[in-house]
Amino acid sequence: MARMTRRTAALAAVSTLSITGLALSGCAGGPGDGDDAGTLRLWHYEGADSAMGKAWDEAIKIFEEETGATVEFEEKSFEQIQKTASQVLDTDAAPDLMEFNKGNATAGFLASTGLIADISDAVAEYGWDDKLAPSLQTTAKYSEDGVMGGDTWYGIPNYGEFVGVYYNLDMFEEAGLEIPTTYDEFVDVLDAFVEQGVTPLAEAGAEYPLGQLWYQLALSQADRSFVDDYQLYANPVDWSGPEVTYATETLADYVDAGYIAKDVSSVVAEDAGVSFINGTSPIFVSGSWWYGRFVAEATGFEWTMASFPESQLSLGSSGNLWVVPANAANADLAYEFIDITMRPEIQAIIGNNGGVPVAADPADITDEKSAALIETFNGILDEDGLSFYPDWPAPGFYDVIVQELQGLVTGSQDAAATATNLGAQYDEGTADYR
């Protein structure tokens, strides 16, 4: 894989997206087109029926009523904002407030290049830091080089996400099994399903879920210092150490034991999720972002979700961030809107619609399944357990993980070679950050 530095990544984004960037700027309008002290220009990419979409729609109504200002909302796709931000934000077409992806290669990049504003003063004024657990703050604060976990606030999340284990309770009951509370019990359950002719784990090796399982296995053997080394470059990662070795060897064992289907390398995430929805697979290790869909579609059986058994650390993070572009015409209005989204009544809308609020009053969560989800998330926060995602440290590392784990599960390379290849690509991709 060719090494891509921050500078070459930015230049590539500008050169390949100049036409779309200009078109987007043209659609957004130039200075003077509604950008006055009474207008907040807002961009986000959440669907109207999503938990965040519903919550933020209500926040817009409250904001307009309380401030007398008008919200000029433009719904953009994730791809539009992700791919054109570095160009559009450097113009007068920049909004006052927008949703943006967290992480070093995304929000961190915008912070390091001066495209989004330092909002530390607003954080102190509104007390947002008191509402966010330390592991949630990590993705909102960046160093001058754009590495998360720095000292400067560049964004605010108002929801969270995490990876856990979904269990089909009906399949467990039919098999005479209990939901595991320890890892040994988890393995016993996997063995029991295999003995009954059932492949227990819904998985996908062509996309993200397999990489999540691999990283979760590493986290089950890790402590916070491993996460800091892997994610924040505190020290070099030992790719032959106990965490990575255990994860890579155990994943290969899972395939050999029949816990995961032999053809997993060609399966996509959607198909893995649908196999759980259809009642084909009793267990699915993936994110809370599936929760709302499972509530709506996995209605033929009872199910639950829990954190990975006997692991203090879990994949997860804050949700995406509210960021204020450096060119924002009305930053003060942006701060007022952010503050409204952190209110209990808005947080409750997120929580009662399948989302994971970061500052909700538990008494406001009236949906039973939503309450269980939030309780699990809060338990992880209480342990300072959110440990981010395996592809975050370097641009393009997601594709590397997919490719290398495909080689592992198909048997074309062993665990040691897989770990060595991952380590080499990681070191190359993070060289500019360390």
Image (cartoon, helix red, strand yellow):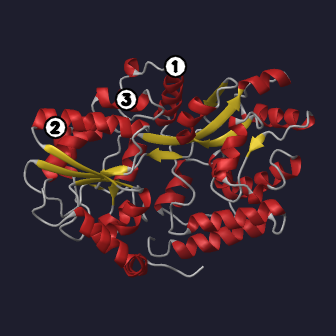
State the separation of the CA atoms marked 2 and 1: 32 Å
Mark 2 or mark 1: which is in front?
A: 2
The residue that appears at 73% across and 41% down in the rendered structure is 275
Asked if labels 1 and 2 touch by Cβ distance under 8 angstroms, the answer is no
Asked if labels 3 and 2 touch by Cβ distance under 8 angstroms, the answer is no
On the image, numbered disc 3 is attached to which residue?
349
Q: Nearer the viewer, residue 333 or 278?
A: 278
Residue 273 in view of the camera: yes
Label 2 residue SS: helix
Q: Residues within 10 Å of mark 3 (few under 14, many from 20)?
A: many
Mark 2 or mark 3, which has the lower sequence index? 2
Label 3 residue SS: helix
Q: Residues within 10 Å of mark 1 (few under 14, many from 20)?
A: few
Q: Amino acid at mark 1?
A: Glu
The residue that appears at 12% across and 57% down in the rendered structure is 35
In the picture shown, does residue 325 fall above or below 126? Answer: below
On the image, numbered disc 1 is attached to which residue?
368
Instruction: Give me the disc on residue 64.
Output: 2
State the separation of the CA atoms marked 2 and 3: 18 Å
Q: Quadrant of the C terminus?
A: bottom left
The residue that appears at 40% across and 46% down in the rendered structure is 46
Residue 183 position, x and y percent, is 73, 36
Q: Residues within 10 Å of mark 2 (few under 14, many from 20)?
A: some
Mark 3 or mark 1, which has the lower sequence index? 3
In the picture shown, does residue 136 fall above or below 55? Answer: below
Label 1 residue SS: helix
Mark 2 or mark 1, which has the lower sequence index? 2
Residue 178 in view of the camera: no
Q: Amino acid at mark 3?
A: Ile
